[in-house]
Image (cartoon, grey):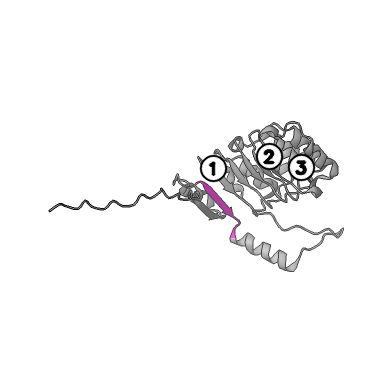
């Protein structure tokens, strides 16, 4: 009697598994937040840290939005109070790759505190942080941000001066400046910045630039050709 060889399992092509997103951890700001951040970053798998406004600041912002602003003696709206994050100055972000502080309206004091922190951050989200030009100038001198590659700065009241300060981020590859009226002077500063040749993504609205500003970007000789072509189509 001849033994029948066992059937072979059909060949299966390897299954492509989607790359796992880096772990994201959120810490709500409080006086204890620096210690909490230090504890979180002991886990070297944490690649992205989100710092959220404190609960008190979130409640104050919600009240401001619902009731509307008060006005000063010349009928100018009084902005809501800034979020206090001075404790950032003592934080060591270590090998953290990406930091998200979006909607933490820390203003210039918060920017100066962040500039005093240590680390090697490559991606920074500072949307709606009320930085203004002085805040960006402070960040541009931050040792922890020297290797920055991606920067989100939507709606921070930046002008051409703020755009010029960005020149210190020499390794930038992606930059989002939407809702900042940087104008023609700001466009010229971006076109001449040290990172111009490595920039692969630049987000701005035409209204942020003016027609002359768009032309500055469309003809920027140091921009990659694909980026110049994009602005020529605007």
Instruction: Tell us which disc is closer to us: 2 or 3.
Output: 3
Say few, some or many: other residues with alpha carbon within 10 Å of mark 1 (under 14 / 14 to 19 / 20 or more).
some
The residue at which mark 3 appears reads as: 231
Q: Which sits earlier in the primary sequence, circle 1 or circle 3?
A: 1
For the record, the magenta segment spans 47-54
Q: In the rendered image of this protein, does residue 145 appear above or below residue 20?
A: above
Locate residue 173: give its quadrant: top right
Q: In the rendered image of this protein, does residue 73 appear above or below residue 109?
A: below
Q: Which mark is residue 48?
A: none
At a point 59% along the width and 35% down the height, the residue shown is 147
SS for callout 3: helix
Say few, some or many: other residues with alpha carbon within 10 Å of mark 3 (under 14 / 14 to 19 / 20 or more).
some
Whole-number angstrom distance, CA of label 2 to CA of label 3: 29 Å
Residue 223 in the magenta stretch? The answer is no
The residue at which mark 2 appears reads as: 138
The residue at which mark 1 appears reads as: 97
């Amino acid at each position: 009697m001849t033994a029948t060889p066992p059937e072979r399992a059909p060949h299966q092509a390897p299954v492509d598994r989607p790359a796992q997103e880096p772990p994201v951890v959120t810490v709500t700001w409080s006086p204890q937040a620096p210690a909490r951040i230090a504890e979180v970053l002991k886990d070297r798998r944490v690649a992205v840290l989100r710092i959220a406004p404190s609960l008190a600041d979130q409640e104050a912002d919600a009240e401001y939005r619902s009731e509307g602003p008060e006005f000063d003696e010349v009928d100018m709206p009084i902005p809501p109070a800034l979020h206090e994050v001075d404790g950032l100055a003592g934080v060591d972000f270590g090998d953290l790759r990406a930091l998200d502080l979006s909607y933490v309206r820390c203003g210039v004091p918060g920017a100066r505190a962040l500039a005093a922190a240590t680390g090697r951050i490559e991606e920074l989200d500072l949307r709606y942080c009320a930085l203004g030009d002085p805040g960006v100038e402070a960040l541009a001198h931050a040792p922890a941000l020297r290797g920055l590659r991606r920067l989100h700065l939507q709606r921070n009241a930046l002008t051409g001066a703020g755009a010029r300060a960005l020149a210190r981020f020499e390794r930038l590859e992606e930059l989002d400046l939407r809702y900042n009226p940087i104008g023609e002077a700001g466009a010229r500063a971006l076109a001449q910045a040290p990172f111009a040749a490595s920039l692969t993504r630049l987000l701005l609205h035409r209204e942020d630039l003016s027609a002359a500003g768009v032309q500055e970007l469309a003809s920027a000789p140091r921009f990659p050709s694909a980026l110049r072509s994009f602005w020529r189509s605007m």
